[in-house]
Image: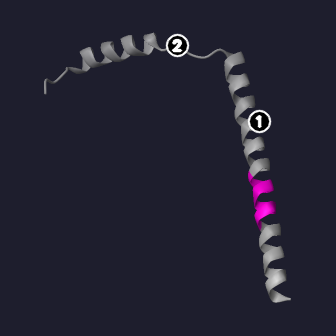
Amino acid sequence: MARTNPLQFAQQTRAEISKVVWPTRREVVLTTVMVFLLAAVAALFFSLVDLGIRSGLQAVLESLGG
């Protein structure tokens, strides 16, 4: 593997960083809101699934236990 001297490395790094397209403040806010919203929806979904499984299991155990 060819070695790059530190000056070339710094220049190449700067060139690559200049190609990065940074998100706007609006994009960051919208993405953050969407993440929190989807996390809340997922939490609600799994809470309902858990409640359903718990209720079903409780009903089965009560019917077996008398």
**Residue at horizontal 81%, vertical 88%?**
65
Q: Tell me the residue that label 2 is attached to.
A: 21
Residue 66 lies in the magenta stretch: no
**Residue at horizontal 83%, vertical 74%?**
59
Left or right, 48 with respect to 18, comes to right
Residue 52 place in picture, x, y as percent: 80, 61
The amino acid type found where label 1 is placed reads Leu
Q: Tell me the residue that label 1 is attached to.
A: 37
Q: Are marks 1 and 2 in contact (CB under 8 Å)?
A: no
> Is residue 57 or residue 22 the one in the foreground?
57
| For discs 1 and 2, the disc positioned in front in the rendered view | 1
- Residue 12 got which mark? none
Q: Quadrant of the N terminus?
A: top left
How crowded pointer 1 is (Cα within 10 Å; few <14, some 14-19, many 20+) is rated as few
Q: Give the image quarter of residue 66.
A: bottom right
The amino acid type found where label 2 is placed reads Val
> Is residue 17 or residue 5 the one in the foreground?
17
Magenta highlight range? 46-53
